[in-house]
Image (cartoon, rainbow, N blue to C red):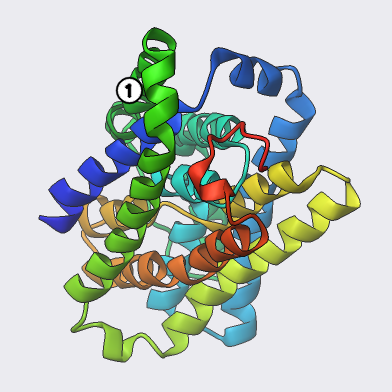
C-alpha cells in the first residue's frame, strides 16, 4: 500500500504544489544553459557509478551488496529528488529537467554501466533489458502531469493560487516528513539491521556524491540554488527503480535490500538540507520557489 499507492500519490501531490510556483519562463531559462545540463548529466552518469565502484573496492563489499550498490548508482533520480530540491531552495525547473533527461537515457545507460562495472569486478554479468515505456510511464504520471497541471492552475487562477501557495508549501513539507516517517515504520523490522556494511555503503554513496558535487559547484561558481539542485540530483537516487530492477526484472530480491536501505538513509542528508534552508531563511518555506526569500 505504501509503495504502490500512498507514495506515488503523495509525490504527485507534492509535484502539483511545485508546479503552482513554476512558469514556462523557468524552463526556458534552463534551456538557454546547455552547459549546466551537461554538467548535471556528467555528474549523474559518470561520477556516481565511479563512486559506487570505489566504495565497493574500499569496503570490500560482498557480491550481493556490491551488485546492489552498482545497480542503485546507475539508476536515474526520481520525483523525490525534485521535491527535496524544491524544499531545499534549489532550482525546481533545473531539477525536473535533469530528472527527465536522465530517465530518458536510463534504458540505455543503466544496463551499459552495470555490466561494465560487474565485468571490472569479475562478477558474473547480468543481462539487463530495461523496457523503455514502463520506465518512462511512472515519471510521466507521478511527476510531469501533476507539474503541468500545477502550472496550468497557476496560469488560470493566479490570485487564488498566490494566496494559497504559502500554506500549500507548508503542506508539501509536512507531507514529505510524513513519508519519511511512514517508510521507517513500514520497514521497522529491517531497521535493526540497517547499521551494517550496507548502511555504510548506501550512506557513503549518497554523502560522498553530494560533497563532491558541492565542491564542483563552488569551484565553478554556479550559485547557491543551482549548486543545491545538482547536489540533490546527484545524491538522491531512485531507490524504487533499483528495487524494481532487482526484484522484478532480475528476480533477485536480495539485491533489492540495498535499495531499500538507501531509500531510508538518503532522507538523513535530505532532511539536513531542508533544515538548513529553514534555519537560514525562516520565511522561505512559505514563499514560492521564485520568491525573494531565496
Image location (x, y in percent) of residue 85: 55, 47
From the viewer's perspective, is 233 left or right of 220? Answer: left
Q: Residue at x 57, y 69 (%)?
A: 205
> Relative to 211, does residue 29 appear above or below in the rendering?
above
Q: Which residue is mark 1?
A: 145
Between 227 and 78, the one nearer to me in the picture = 227
> Relative to 163, does residue 130 appear above or below in the rendering?
below
- Does the rendering let one see residue 120? no
Between 72 and 167, the one nearer to me in the picture = 167
Q: Quarter holding the C terminus?
A: top right
- Does the rendering let one see residue 31? yes
Q: Quarter holding the N terminus?
A: bottom left
Between 53 and 152, the one nearer to me in the picture = 152
Image location (x, y in percent) of residue 130: 35, 39
Q: Residue at x 47, y 29 (%)?
A: 104
Label 1: which secondary element: helix
Amino acid at each position: 500500500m505504501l509503495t504502490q499507492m500512498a507514495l506515488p500519490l503523495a509525490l504527485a501531490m507534492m509535484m502539483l504544489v511545485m508546479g503552482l510556483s513554476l512558469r514556462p519562463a523557468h524552463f526556458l531559462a534552463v534551456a538557454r544553459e546547455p552547459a549546466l545540463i551537461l554538467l548535471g548529466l556528467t555528474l549523474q552518469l559518470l561520477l556516481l557509478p565511479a563512486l559506487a565502484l570505489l566504495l565497493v573496492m574500499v569496503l570490500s563489499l560482498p557480491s550481493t551488496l556490491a551488485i546492489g550498490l552498482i545497480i542503485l548508482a546507475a539508476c536515474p533520480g526520481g520525483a523525490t529528488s525534485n521535491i527535496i530540491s524544491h524544499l531545499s531552495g534549489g532550482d525546481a525547473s533545473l531539477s525536473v529537467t535533469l530528472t527527465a533527461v536522465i530517465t530518458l537515457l536510463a534504458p540505455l545507460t543503466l544496463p551499459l554501466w552495470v555490466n561494465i562495472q560487474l565485468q571490472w569486478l569479475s562478477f558474473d554479468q547480468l543481462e539487463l533489458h530495461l523496457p523503455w515505456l514502463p520506465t518512462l510511464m511512472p515519471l510521466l504520471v507521478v511527476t510531469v502531469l501533476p507539474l503541468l497541471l500545477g502550472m496550468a492552475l497557476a496560469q488560470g487562477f493566479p490570485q487564488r493560487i498566490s494566496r494559497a501557495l504559502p500554506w500549500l508549501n507548508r503542506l508539501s513539507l509536512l507531507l514529505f516528513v510524513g513519508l519519511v516517517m511512514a517508510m521507517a515504520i513500514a520497514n521497522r523490522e529491517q531497521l535493526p539491521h540497517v547499521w551494517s556494511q550496507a548502511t555504510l555503503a548506501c550512506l557513503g554513496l549518497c554523502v560522498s556524491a553530494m560533497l563532491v558535487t558541492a565542491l564542483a559547484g563552488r569551484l565553478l561558481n554556479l550559485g547557491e540554488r543551482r549548486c543545491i539542485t545538482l547536489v540533490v540530483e546527484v545524491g538522491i537516487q531512485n531507490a524504487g527503480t533499483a528495487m524494481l530492477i532487482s526484484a522484478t526484472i532480475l528476480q533477485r530480491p536480495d539485491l533489492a535490500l540495498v535499495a531499500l536501505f538507501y531509500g531510508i538513509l538518503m532522507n538523513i542528508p535530505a532532511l539536513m538540507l531542508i533544515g538548513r534552508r529553514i534555519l537560514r531563511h525562516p520565511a522561505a518555506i512559505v514563499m514560492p520557489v521564485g520568491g525573494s526569500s531565496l
